[in-house]
Image: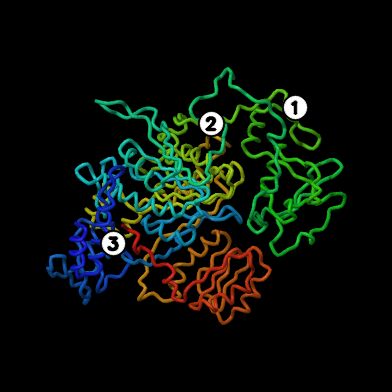
Amino acid sequence: MTNVLDGLLARVQDQRLRAALASEVERLRDTKDFGLVFERHIPENVRLYSYPVKRGVTVQERSGTSDATWLVRQVRDGKADLLDPEGQESARPLEELVVVRRFGEPIYPGLARVGAVEQGGDKPFHAVINGENFHVLETLLYAYEGKVDCIYIDPPYNSGARDWKYNNDYVDTEDAYRHSKWLAFMERRLLLAKRLLNPADSMLIVAIDEKEYLRLGLLLEEIFASVNIQMVTSVVKPGGTSRTHGFSRVDEYLFFVFIGSAQLARTGDNMLTEIPADGEVPTSALSESDLWEGMVRRGIGVVRSQRPKQFYPIFIDEDKHRIVESGEPLPLDTPRASVKERPGLRTVWPIKDDGSEGFWQLSPAGLEKARARGTVRVGRYNKKTGQWRIQYMKAKKAKAVEDGTVATLGKDENGVVILDVSESALSPESTPRTVWNRPLHDASVGGAGLLNKLLPGRKFPFPKSLYAVEDALRFFVKEKPDAIVLDFFGGSGTTAHAVFRLNLQDDGCRQCILVTNNEVSENEAQVLRAKGRAPGDPEWEALGIFQHVTLPRVTAAVTGTTPEGQAIVGDYKSIDESAMADGFEENVEFLELSYLDRNEVSRGKAFEAIAPLLWLKAGASGPMIAKVKRPFAAPENARYAVLFDINHWHDFAEAVRGRDYITHIFVITDSVAQYQQVVAELPPTADVSMLYEDYLRNFEINVGGAQ
């Protein structure tokens, strides 16, 4: 049989068709007796509304009412001459058509900047990206392959209620292939997610309900072979669903995929039982060391340039062990020796034990809040650094002191709380259970109810509870204050919002990359079509998820104001309660995936399109180099630099020398020999990358990975 098939395949003249058939035959040969077997279907396609209709492209009706495709034979006089798969010819006005690309056909992506909110000072930016998530994931591989610490996704549940699309068509209960389409859809994206996750230590979290959890579990077992996978049951709708002939459903499931050495961080909450009112929970004796810790950020790679606004002097009275005041953050190019000593005071800097310059865990404003609470103090003298230690309490522990969970005897003469450890105890850090039952995980309260406060009058179907996502992430990024968190089914933006909350609780600098699309609901689509509108029209796009919900929700969360400019009413619950109107000290860049025509785009325009990718790769911090600037670009305080003209490499090397805050350098050349010559003269601490002069050659995606 094998020889017969090989012989028949050899007779196929079309090379691409022959290769595709050979691939499918190979799949059949590898079919397993056990495991998940499903039809992988024709690869998905994507509509490119901004791409020009021209000869040789494939098109569909722009209205989206038909999935028929045509090949464009010629464009003239505002019309396209078309040829359908059956060989029938026709002509249509250009404005009625949209270009489509099937997964597997080469695509040249770009990222366009569509807005930003900046309230985080020099903290790195979060990124919220509008685009088809398969292509966005492929694009993100350039900047983040193997670097993501945690992925949280809430994919379509495939309920049969026309809640997701395959090839631009809603999938419902009448579709006999809806389960295999869903699996094919998920497999393509999870394979890319696997490449983005840090293989040494990372976590994948997937939320799902009863419709697909069995199939999803098998799929995860196949893609992530030989790793620990656990499933948690989470109560998200205590009121239950309305079911006449079955049990009322109150829960959904979370799959946790432990990559490498990933472990749970203990949070003190077992997620199932409440602490009894009589207090009969086993406790352990409390010591002061359980609450106080050093204020200098520890860890490999922690340097002053990462957080320059948290590199500032603290002036103390050595005799009284008192913090008197703090100074202004020191610019990166200013040595600390330039700061004059205050009479009678000692200057303390955030110096690590190895003698290098780090940064404080608290900003100057955060330090002043801690002084007012009495939760920061002068510790012991550090002989290694020649500095006095500054100690503080993280947010959760400071709150335990404030609310009386940890007993105190007032404050000392320096305004520092006096702990009464004899009267205090800590509950043991319980192992979290596989059933979670937390009132704040109720989607109607922490999801729809909270979203209505942020965006009054705007609806989004089934938003997750903010606190449910926050709790799930905390188990894996609690001890990673600089973690990168990705959600490529971003929906309304809950995951980004949860990362903001986690950062607030411990002054972290975690970054969220959120990917969503700009689909409208089926009902809205029907209303818009009745008005003569089509996808791509401004009125249509204004009601899409990204424009109507995600962007304004994330902006509202950061600023503390609704899109109408009103202060958000209400408080955040759970850990570190705060007023929603206070917002967050965070920076967010909003981006949109674009598709470039490599035959028509100029080099300058191509660089502008890929510029955000270079910025993301360099940590999404500091200014972005958005345009070609010859012979090179190395802006002040930028975390990266670009050499556009290789002939000026010597001047470029001089310009970046001594700037240890530059973490990435991009050299544009087609010559490997020239590139190697330049690299030898550049700072060894920088990550140096070569870019082709034809920029798009670096970023061709969608080739061979669609299945």
- Assign the N terminus to one quadrant of the image: bottom left
Identify which residue is drawn at 20% across, 74% down.
Answer: 73
Quarter of the view holding residue 680: bottom right
Whether tag 2 and tag 1 are in contact, CB under 8 A, the answer is no
In the image, residue 388 sits, relative to residue 671, either above or below, namely above
Q: Is residue 610 left or right of residue 211?
A: right
397, above or below 278, in the image: below
Looking at the rendered structure, the kind of residue marked 2 is: Thr
For label 2, the residue is 431
Mark with earlier residue (2, 3):
3
Provide the residue designation for mark 3: 102
The answer to which image quadrant residue 455 occupies is top left
SS assignment at label 2: loop
What secondary structure is found at the residue carrying circle 3? strand
Q: Which residue is mark 1?
A: 409
Residue 559 shows in this picture: yes
Relative to 258, is 398 on the left or the right?
Answer: right
Q: Nearer the viewer, mark 2 or mark 3?
A: 2
Q: Secondary structure at mark 1?
A: strand
* Relative depth, front residue between 37 and 562: 37
Name the foreground residue: 603 vs 331: 603
Marks 1 and 3, the one that precedes in the sequence: 3
The percent position of residue 100, horizontal first and vertical second, equals: 27, 63
Crowd class of label 2 (few under 14; some 14 to 19; many from 20; radius 10 Å): some
